[in-house]
Amino acid sequence: MTDRFDATTETIDDGVTVVCVRGPVDLYGAGELKRMLVAAVETAARGVIIDLTATTFMDSSGLAALVAAHRRARLLGCGLVLVNVDGGIGQTLKVTGLDSILGVAADREAALKRIAAQDSS
């Protein structure tokens, strides 16, 4: 388990960009995360998966980064799906109502299916 924020990107499956977020996302890492997410949305050919599997904590500034990426994705017609297996972050998304706004999938395979479904609609 990491105690500092880190994020990386990779492209998979014909143009889907995955942003893997590790450690805590708080005020100190949220700005960098927002920049990475917006850049991923602007350059992805098909969609973006935000993998929060290794994310240990997320405060309101992290949630704001997710919302900013979601808004940009909608504007550009880019699919965006979160992968979240952490109960605490999932609960935060649910309490704030963001789980109904942001697409949330259990794993990358389910996220890829959601992006494919968005492509065909």
Image (spheres, helix red, strand yellow):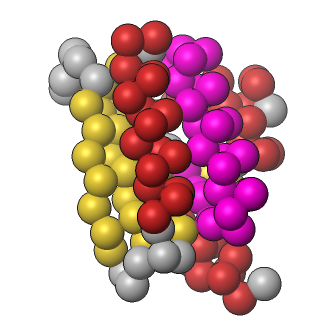
59 or 33: nearer the eye? 33
86 or 93: nearer the eye? 93
Instruction: State left or right for residue 4 relative to residue 90.
Output: left
Q: Position of residue 71 (x, y in %)?
A: 72, 46
Q: Is residue 92 magenta?
A: no
Looking at the image, is 90 positioned above or below residue 77?
A: above
Q: Is residue 73 magenta?
A: yes
Locate the N terminus and report the quarter of the image it occupies. top left
Q: Residue at x 45, y 22 (%)?
A: 30
Instruction: State left or right for residue 54 relative to residue 81.
Output: left
Instruction: State left or right for residue 28 relative to residue 70.
Output: left
Q: Residue at x 74, y 57 (%)?
A: 75
Instruction: State left or right for residue 113 relative to residue 30.
Output: right
What secondary structure prevails in the magenta region? helix
Looking at the image, is 71 positioned above or below residue 34?
A: below
Q: Position of residue 45 (x, y in %)?
A: 48, 76
Q: Position of residue 34 (x, y in %)?
A: 49, 34
The part of the image, by quadrant, that contains residue 120 is bottom right
Q: Residue at x 38, y 59 (%)?
A: 18
Question: Can residue 49 be seen in this snapshot?
Answer: no
Q: Which residues are magenta?
A: 58-83
